[in-house]
Amino acid sequence: MKTTQTNLDPQVLPSRGIILSAMMAVASLGPMTLAFAVDASPVPSPAASPALDAHGAKALYAKGLALLRGTGGTKDAAAAGKLFQEAAQAGSPEAQAALGYLYSVGQGMPKDEDLAIKYLRMASAQKLASAQHNLAIMLLRKDAAANEAEAIVLLSDAADRGFLPSQIELGETYFDGKWTIKPDPDKAFHFMQLAAARGNASAANYLGVMYNTGSGVTMDKAQAAQWFEKAARQGEAKALVNLGRCYASGSGVEKNLVTAYALFKLGNEIRTGSIGIELTEMEHNLTPEQRQEAVKVMGSYRESAGVTAPSVKEIAL
């Protein structure tokens, strides 16, 4: 495969952080904004309370998750931690993973990296994908050189079983090179394909970049434009700009400065200041009628992505 190194803007993706698994979905919580007092009171041991079956452990986990998120009207991370501990002792992998998360960020529990890793290992042993992902990230942060092999196995297993954050994490890691892991365009393309097949806009944008430059795949400008289009239609800011550049130069599509301007303008609104100079130069080269026509093109992309204001989630290159 032909490989070309590409200079890209920095990105911040949810996959770069710790993920907490919900009952049937994955929620990226990111850093907590509220600090709760640490409750260091002892947690009832299994012998001190009736044994929990799998159903009871699942119910406790659900109650803990509601307390952590405040979905029932009360938000209490310390109380959530107690419920997670009891459910974890009964073998709930979701509760074990949640405890790992709380210990990793020091939310409702004392911050303790070793305990976080311990509980994440317990959940990972039960093949909980979110726990495998979080454990891999923690191991890499702790000592990338020593833990790289184990982390890649964990992330790859989760990715191969369809865990989107792991697919993107591996795709980005192999695309850019991270930790002690060197860039590998072929592997980057593989994992981005998996994520793009799930409809992920960031992965679609990456595929566009890779087809555009021949990184990990045979260069194909038309394919690049098609992937940029898929991502742009989801409101992916950088894909809008990338597709705009395709239309501005006629790369993989028929040259159309009105469409290019519309895409630049919408991308710039979503990700303010990303292409100010290019946008200003193009604007000066269009007539008032052309700029008005561009407004209609912007409306089409807004409608596709559900963008009604200059604010869209950014899972962007």
Image (cartoon, helix red, strand yellow):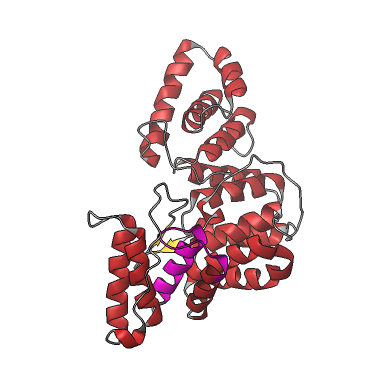
Name the residue nearer the viewer: 38 or 212: 38
| 38 magenta-colored | no
Residue drawn at the location 40% of the way across and 66% of the way down: 40
Q: Position of residue 6 (x, y in %)?
A: 72, 44
Placement of 1 over or under 35, stated as above or below: below
Q: Main secondary structure of the magenta part?
A: helix
Residue 194 seen anywhere in this rendered image of the structure: no
- Corner quadrant of residue 244: top right
User: Residue 265, relative to residue 64: is it above or below?
Assistant: above
Instruction: Answer whether residue 114 is visible to the viewer in this image.
Output: yes
Quadrant hosting residue 24: bottom left
* The one of 164 and 68 positioned closer to us in this rendering: 68
Magenta region: 93-114
Image location of residue 177, percent across then percent down? 71, 55
Instruction: Name the outermost residue toward the front.
Output: 41
Residue positioned most to the left: 73
User: Where does residue 78 sit, x and y in percent of width and height?
Assistant: 36, 62
Q: Quadrant of the N terminus?
A: bottom right
Pick whichever, 244 or 110, lies toward us: 110
Q: Position of residue 60 (x, y in %)?
A: 29, 73
* Horizontal arrangement in the rendering, residue 147 relative to residue 30 (left or right): right
Which image quarter is the C terminus in?
top right
How many numbered marks have been drawn onto this rendered protein structure?
0
Q: Tell me what residue is drawn at x 59 percent, y 62 percent.
A: 137
Q: Does the segment drawn in magenta span residue 108?
A: yes
Residue shown at 38% from the left, 54% from the top? 36
